[in-house]
């Protein structure tokens, strides 16, 4: 995610140009931090790179969230993350073919915190599947009263084969490995890249992202070995 502290970074276009050689396949941003013109240019450049585009809604009011959904439709985003009013968001999305991943649990504030027990998370995810959502956006490491990995496992149970994206405060290879083991399909990471805190011995944004790519590749390799498909 081209974001820091839950906002799209203001030099997102320059940073995107910098990281294009890594050939990332999934690149996203928030609905706040830069103006709509910049978001449009960013989405178009990501699309031209061949990557899947993501926009996460972190606007705190229902009206702002719906307005951001309209922006996502106008920009032709591939996957919309966040928001809680599933029915109204889906009305706005219409037949746009945008994959929708609403927040499960009870998100509040900005930067967003997450309330909710595992059973509530599981119930929300089951309902999202029934409503035709592509999956969910789980702020596991922003949880205020539950163990993050218990929430991931609960969401996995509720979603079945639908996609589980974990967003917010993912900053270490240990967290990524734990999320993989607990059943997450994907995660977002932004601040840890731009703070240089993911791989503390490396200095550049490119190096931070390359380290994350290498760690994810290693996890995929381990999964193949366990299944016997990598032998």
Image (cartoon, grey):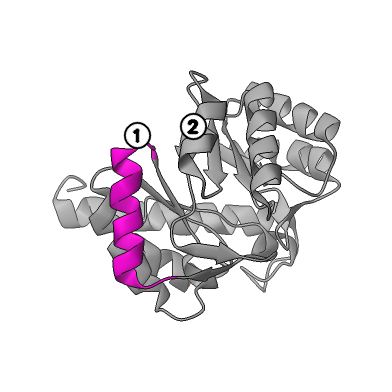
Q: Quadrant of residue 218?
A: bottom left
Q: Which mark is residue 132?
A: 1
| CB atoms of marks 1 and 2 within 8 Å | yes
Say above or below: 4 vs 23: below
Q: Is residue 30 something one can see in this rendering?
A: no
Q: Quadrant of residue 189?
A: bottom right
Q: Which mark is residue 90?
A: 2
Residue furthest toward the top? 95
Looking at the rendered structure, the secondary structure element under dot 1 is loop
Q: Is residue 24 left or right of residue 48?
A: left
Residue at 35% x, 55% y is: 124
Looking at the rendered structure, the secondary structure element under dot 2 is helix
Say which of 103 and 225 sits in front.
103
Q: Which residues are magenta?
A: 116-134
Is 126 colored magenta in this rendering?
A: yes
- Residue 121 in the image, given as x and y percentages of width and height: 36, 62
Q: Is residue 34 left or right of residue 170?
A: right
Q: Earlier in the sequence, mark 1 or mark 2?
A: 2
């Amino acid at each position: 995610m081209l974001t820091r502290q839950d906002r799209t970074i203001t030099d997102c276009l320059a940073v995107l140009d910098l990281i294009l050689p890594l050939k990332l396949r999934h690149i996203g941003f928030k609905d706040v931090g830069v103006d709509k013109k910049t978001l449009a240019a960013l989405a178009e450049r990501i699309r031209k790179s061949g990557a899947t585009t993501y926009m996460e809604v972190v606007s705190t009011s229902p009206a702002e969230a719906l307005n951001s959904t309209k922006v996502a439709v106008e920009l032709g985003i591939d996957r919309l993350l966040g928001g809680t009013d599933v029915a109204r968001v889906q009305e706005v999305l219409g037949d746009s073919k945008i994959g929708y991943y609403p927040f499960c649990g009870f998100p509040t504030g900005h930067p967003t915190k997450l309330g909710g027990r595992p059973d509530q998370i599981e119930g929300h995810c089951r309902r999202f599947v029934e409503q035709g959502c592509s999956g969910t956006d789980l702020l596991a490491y922003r949880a205020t009263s539950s163990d993050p990995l218990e929430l991931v496992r609960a969401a996995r149970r509720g979603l079945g084969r639908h996609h589980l994206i974990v967003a917010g405060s993912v900053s270490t290879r240990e967290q990524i490995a734990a999320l993989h083991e607990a059943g997450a399909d994907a995660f977002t990471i932004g601040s840890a890249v731009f703070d240089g805190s993911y791989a503390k011995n490396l200095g550049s944004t490119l190096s931070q992202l390359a380290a994350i790519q290498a760690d994810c590749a290693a996890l995929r390799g381990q999964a193949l070995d366990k299944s016997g498909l990598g032998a």
